[in-house]
Image (spheres, helix red, strand yellow):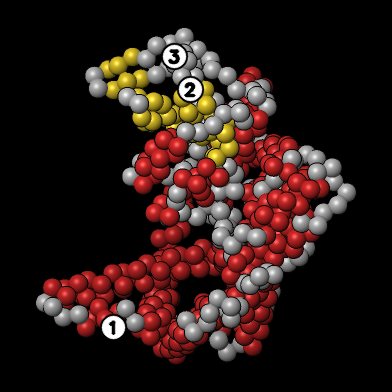
């Protein structure tokens, strides 16, 4: 049962955090884009949220100096990590806001929240038992208890605000908007939300024994799915010798699916095994089958690593491949560790899984923290990899994504694109310099939604790359295209991207009059003349796994690898619907 003094401690930290967040908000609204410094603001937010939440979660040890030391130390480390990410993201040669990276906030949020959740049970164990991980049962209970405690507290906040909005809505019916006016004020929003979360945390602590029984029962139910996951993993692996391993690389989704299967196996194994004290409630023969399936987990890890290695060799590093590699490394720790633990004959089945889970927990925190340092900065790795491919000739200058360096890779990418603007020692120096300088001069990021009211025929013609090169576009077509855009019947993405719109003049129906194929991502269109006017005839679909878009289209058209292929199948109509058959 939580004491009154402990409840007051939790509520006091909630009020302080709410006021601190409000003051930070008031400071931010006074800043301009030129004076805003996220590498200062982000650490302040991290310090306020992490320290206050840690103090609340470990309120029963509030009199111990170690709680203060661990809470402040973690906050400072994460603040430093967030400052580095923000500095690399927002600081550039032409001002902080110009190089905003949309994934940076998610990056630091993932690092801080994951490390906090993983390390909190160890800190709680240290305060309770004077050791960091002597009793695995306490670590397990603390981890799941913290997760349920936060989840129920967040649910409490959602219900709290839901009732407040209901209250405001009822009063608005009576033409009284005072409640709505109060709820919309930041001076109320921040302290009220923080206080509601604190109340939820305090209420959970008062009923913790009941909730622990509920989540234990839920884990037992989830653990019953472990044999099904093991069966899926085994059957899939046994089918590979008959289907061939090459089929895994054709779809492009084999690695994510196998990774998801490994994650599911680790999760359900731990929900069934829990803290090893109760044992797994499975028949002996089924337990032996699960033990056998544990041995196939390293095979999946190696398949995932091999598949990712192929993609990196072919296309270099990307952010997705970097984070995929991080996940594969962690899953390899689990899979190989569990396989070794399963081989050992102990009284308690998988007794060494405790050591594997503890080692994996620290490995996750170390790897994530390193991604917020120069040692393992994902953006730096991606930029260096792609530039190396450019300079070695593996990627042609026209196929290189200079806009990624300019707008999506922060300070590091901008420094490198300025280096490319002065590059020497490459066979296509002039082309690289021209493309790099064109991006440096840009003030708007690609991919923005353009204002169709300002679009004109001249701007469209400058963005169009016409094939064959000897062809010309009639002004009537440009006017018809502009009308389609103004009527919101088309929103060509190529007009707001770095790559020109690919347009192909070709006779598609054999009447010796050219139609126009307008390639635009996954919504390519065909135009033709009917009754003396250019009209849209239909859409373009691809018989391959991907629609023909962007660089693939440009490469084929420039190489002259484009022709009309007759279709052996006629269309057919069922009622008002018409169907076409695309051959393999």
Q: What secondary structure is marked by label 2?
A: loop
CA distance for labels 1 and 3: 70 Å
CA distance for labels 3 and 2: 8 Å
Q: Residue at x 58, y 37 (%)?
A: 465
Residue 168, picture quadrant: bottom left
Q: Which residue is mark 3?
A: 511
Q: Quadrant of the N terminus?
A: bottom left
Task: Please report whichever mark, 1 or 2, sits nearer to the chain's N-terminal start.
Answer: 1
Tell me where residue 94 appears, x and y as whole percent.
66, 70
In this view, the residue in front, 396 or 142, is 396
Q: Are marks 1 and 3 in contact (CB under 8 Å)?
A: no
Which residue of the protein is positioned furthest toward the left in this rendering? 174
Task: Please report whichever mark, 1 or 3, sits nearer to the chain's N-terminal start.
Answer: 1
Q: What secondary structure is marked by label 1?
A: helix
Q: How many marks?
A: 3
Which residue of the protein is positioned furthest toward the right in this rendering? 425
Q: Which residue is mark 2?
A: 514
Instruction: Note whether residue 332 is visible.
Output: no
Number of residues whose C-alpha sits closer than 10 Å to that of mark 3, classed few (under 14), some (14–19) or many (20 or more): few
Where 170 sits versus 352, above or below? below
In this view, the residue in front, 215 or 459, is 459
Q: Are marks 3 and 2 in contact (CB under 8 Å)?
A: no
Give the side of residue 129 with respect to residue 488, left or right.
right
Tell me where residue 385 appears, x and y as whole percent.
76, 49
Q: Residue at x 73, y 51 (%)?
A: 434
Residue 161, picture quadrant: bottom left
Q: Residue at x 65, y 24 (%)?
A: 560
Q: Residue at x 74, y 40 (%)?
A: 396
CA distance for labels 1 and 2: 65 Å
Which label number is shown at residue 182?
1
Number of residues whose C-alpha sits closer than 10 Å to that of mark 2, classed few (under 14), some (14–19) or many (20 or more): some
Q: Are marks 1 and 2 in contact (CB under 8 Å)?
A: no
């Amino acid at each position: 049962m939580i004491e009154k003094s402990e409840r007051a401690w939790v509520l006091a930290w909630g009020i302080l955090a709410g006021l601190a967040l409000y003051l930070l908000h008031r400071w931010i609204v006074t800043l301009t884009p030129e004076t805003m410094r996220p590498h200062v603001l982000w650490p302040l937010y991290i310090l306020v949220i992490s320290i206050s939440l840690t103090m609340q979660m470990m309120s029963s040890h509030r009199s111990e100096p170690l709680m203060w030391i661990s809470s402040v130390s973690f906050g400072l480390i994460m603040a430093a990590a967030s400052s580095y990410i923000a500095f690399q993201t927002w600081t550039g040669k032409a001002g902080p806001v110009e190089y905003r990276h949309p994934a940076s906030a998610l990056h630091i949020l993932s690092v801080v929240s994951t490390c906090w959740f993983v390390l909190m049970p160890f800190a709680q164990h240290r305060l309770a038992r004077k050791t960091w991980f002597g009793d695995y049962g306490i670590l397990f209970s603390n981890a799941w208890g913290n997760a349920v405690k936060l989840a129920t507290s967040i649910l409490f906040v959602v219900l709290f605000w839901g009732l407040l909005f209901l209250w405001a809505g009822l009063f608005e019916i009576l033409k009284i908007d005072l409640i709505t006016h109060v709820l919309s004020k930041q001076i109320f929003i921040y302290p009220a939300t923080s206080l509601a979360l604190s109340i939820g945390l305090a209420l959970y602590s008062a009923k913790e024994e009941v909730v622990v029984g509920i989540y234990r029962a839920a884990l037992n139910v989830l653990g019953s799915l472990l044999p099904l996951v093991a069966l899926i993993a085994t059957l899939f692996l046994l089918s590979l010798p008959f289907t061939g391993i090459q089929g895994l690389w054709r779809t492009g989704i084999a690695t994510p699916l196998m990774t998801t299967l490994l994650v599911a196996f680790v999760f359900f194994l731990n929900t069934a095994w829990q803290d090893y004290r109760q044992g797994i409630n499975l028949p002996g023969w089924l337990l032996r089958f699960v033990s056998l399936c544990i041995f196939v987990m390293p095979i999946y890890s190696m398949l995932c690593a091999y598949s990712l290695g192929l993609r990196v060799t072919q296309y270099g590093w990307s952010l997705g491949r970097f984070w995929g590699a991080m996940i594969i490394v962690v899953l390899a720790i689990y899979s190989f560790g569990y396989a070794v633990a399963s081989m050992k004959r102990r009284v308690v089945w998988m007794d060494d899984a405790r050591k594997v889970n503890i080692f994996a927990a620290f490995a996750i925190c170390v790897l994530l923290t390193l991604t917020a340092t120069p040692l393992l900065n994902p953006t730096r790795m991606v930029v260096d990899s792609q530039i190396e491919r450019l300079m070695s000739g593996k990627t042609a200058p026209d196929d290189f994504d200079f806009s990624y360096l300019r707008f999506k890779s922060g300070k590091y990418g901008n420094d490198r694109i300025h280096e490319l603007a002065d590059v020497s020692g490459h066979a296509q120096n002039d082309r690289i310099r021209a493309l790099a300088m064109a991006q440096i001069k840009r003030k708007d990021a690609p991919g923005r939604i353009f204002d169709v009211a300002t679009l004109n025929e001249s701007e469209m013609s400058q963005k169009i790359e016409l094939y064959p090169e000897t062809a010309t576009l009639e002004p009537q077509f440009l006017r018809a295209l502009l009308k389609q855009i103004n009527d919101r019947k088309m929103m060509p993405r190529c007009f707001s991207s770095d790559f020109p719109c690919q347009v192909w003049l070709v006779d598609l129906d054999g009447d010796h009059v050219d139609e126009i194929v307008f390639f635009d991502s996954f919504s390519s269109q065909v135009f033709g003349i009917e009754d003396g006017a250019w009209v849209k005839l239909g859409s373009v679909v691809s018989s391959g796994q991907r629609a023909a878009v962007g660089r693939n289209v440009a490469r084929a058209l420039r190489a002259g690898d484009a022709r009309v292929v007759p279709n052996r199948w006629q269309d057919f109509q069922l009622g008002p619907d018409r169907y076409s058959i695309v051959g393999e």
